[in-house]
Image (cartoon, helix red, strand yellow):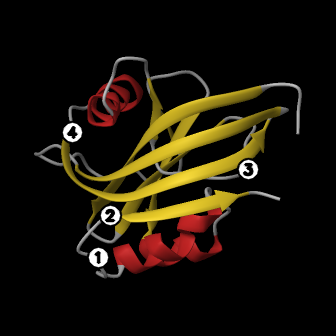
Amino acid sequence: MTAKTIIRGRACAVIRQADRLLLNRFGGDSFWALPGGAVELGEFSTDALVREMREELGVTVELGRLVWMVENLFEYRGTDFTEYGFYYEVAWPLPARPLLEGEFVGQEPDQFFRWVRNEDIAVLDFRPTVLRLPLLAHVSGAKSAAPLHFLHKDN
């Protein structure tokens, strides 16, 4: 355990277009995650996700259903995190922009995005790792009737 611990809410988007899923990473990181961001004090996770997509990508998205809730304990850049994540299906705004090949820069500095083919998710360094199999099942068409709840701790 490090000397500093942050407790936060995080809202994330599962955004698909055709056979691709939108992922993001920060400069210096080797891993990819679903796009989203911190839930601010006095803010609902749904409002946070709409705000984050506007800030990070310059788009206004339409939220769908809550797919997963993840309680995630991990260390990142010397800080311990206790994170409560809310993962929503999100519709990309229409008319859909053409999918960019490779990485592209978001609206915030040092943040990168990439449209990834569904089958490539299995070989990427993806976090939180507890969502890799549920994400692969989700993009393959498997859907649960209710949101799934995961508890995860990185070793």
Q: Secondary structure at mark 2?
A: loop
Residue 139 placement (x, y as % from top left): 36, 74
**How packed is label 3: few (under 14 Cα within 10 Å), some, or many (20 or more)?**
few
Residue 137's quadrant in the figure?
bottom left
Question: In front of the other: label 1 or label 3?
Answer: 1
Q: Is residue 93 left or right of residue 9?
A: left
The residue carrying mark 1 is 144
**Quadrant housing the N terminus:** top right
At label 1, the amino acid type is Ser
Earlier along the polypeptide chain: callout 4 or callout 3? 3
Earlier along the polypeptide chain: callout 1 or callout 3? 3
Q: Is residue 126 left or right of residue 29?
A: left
The residue carrying mark 2 is 147
Q: Secondary structure at mark 4?
A: loop
The residue that appears at 36% across and 74% down in the rendered structure is 138
Q: Secondary structure at mark 1?
A: loop
Disc assigned to residue 30: 3
Task: Calculate the distance from the C-alpha at mark 1 to the C-alpha at mark 4.
Answer: 23 Å
Task: Calculate the distance from the C-alpha at mark 3 to the C-alpha at mark 2.
Answer: 29 Å
The residue that appears at 40% across and 47% down in the rendered structure is 86
Task: Calculate the distance from the C-alpha at mark 2 to the C-alpha at mark 4.
Answer: 20 Å
Disc assigned to residue 50: none
Q: Is residue 146 above or below residue 60?
A: below
The residue lying furthest to the left in this view is 95
Residue 48 placement (x, y as % from top left): 34, 29
The residue carrying mark 4 is 61
